[in-house]
Image (cartoon, rainbow, N blue to C red):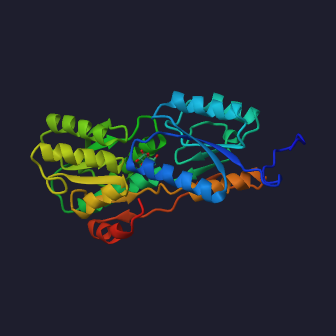
Amino acid sequence: CGGGTQAAPSGGADKKIVMGFAQVGAESGWRTANTKSVQESAKTAGIDLKFSDAQQKQENQIKAIRSYIQQKVDVIAFSPVVESGWDTVLKEAKDAKIPVILTDRAVDSADKSLYKTFLGSDFVLEGKKAGEWLVAESKSATDTVNIVEIQGTTGSAPANDRKQGFEEAIKADPKLKIIASQSGDFTRSGGKQVMEAFLKNNADIDVVFAHNDDEGLGAIEAIEAAGKVPGKDIKIITIDAVKDGMTALSAGKINYIVECSPLLGTQLMDLAKKVLAGETVPERVVTEETTFTQEQATKALPTRQY
Ligand code: GYE
């Protein structure tokens, strides 16, 4: 198709849409489920997917995006590992007239014309839900409630926003205090290491708020190794609700999980088709999510897909 106007992949008889997808990495159960969702949905939608794994490094993602631009893909989708530093490469895509869709994580670019839409969760709300549960749970406490926070990847949208939402919610009760906060990079080993250090330096920890299930699962290992009982001696709140997290919640080792859905593939392919057909799409598409207590996790587990 020549023309000079917008490339219209849907116009050609059987010309498949080509999508370049720059994934964050394979750091967590959530990410594995997300990758699977994107790959399966592309197949179902008849979209030719070029996939790259950046191993949690922004420079790798930038390289992948530049290579997609060079290959003249029809659309680029990516989940930005951190929020800042994207303007240059996004401008390059725009100049090449390749639309960009943000999925899962946000960028902090002031120029909203650098991407078509952002599909993903409301991370501030997730942090808030975690904090609100703790406020209710701590109602009858008479002493200070000492919280340690295991943050996600430094500078990432979910780490920034979950921290913010959680802090806002726990302000409701001055008994609730964050006594330490550090990044576990959204991994199990990171969560374990950070928790080991927290346990060494703080004699009295009541609650762990981990920014994802994997970090919480790592923290459980550290707590058990220190001879304490996770879920009882130290309460644990996490975000994601992947199978391993839900299993630990059902077993009482985690106390509460806020859901973050990784199943973004179908909506992503849909948005890509619309964008390429020249339809207007909403600037922001928010994923619907719930929360889980121990009983709810036990009920949900048998049919949990990921
Ligand atoms: O919570 C975490 C993953 O960006 C929402 O990234 C995603 C987060 C998710 O590593 O498990």
Residue 164 image position (x, y, % from top left): 41, 45
> Where the N terminus falls, by quadrant?
top right
What residue sits 65% from the left and 28% below the top?
88
Q: Residue 304, position in %: x, y?
A: 39, 65
Asked whether residue 122 is in view, the answer is no
The image shows residue 256, relative to residue 187, as above or below, that is below
Q: Which residue lies furthest to the right in this view?
A: 3
Question: Residue at the location (44% across, 49% down)?
Answer: 32
User: Is the C terminus in the top left, top right, bottom left or bottom right quadrant?
Assistant: bottom left
Is residue 17 visible to us here?
yes
Instruction: Write the residue at 52% across / 45% down.
Output: 105
2 with respect to 23 (left or right):
right
| Residue 198 picture location, percent across and down | 20, 37
Q: Which of 44 and 86 is in front in this view?
A: 44
Q: Tally the marks.
A: 0
Question: Which residue reaches farthest front?
Answer: 14
x 33%, y 67%: residue: 301
Nearest the eye: 202 or 275: 275
Would residue 220 appear left or right of 78 to someone viewing this image?
left
> On the picture, is 196 further left or further right than 210?
left
Residue 250, image x, y percentages: 26, 64
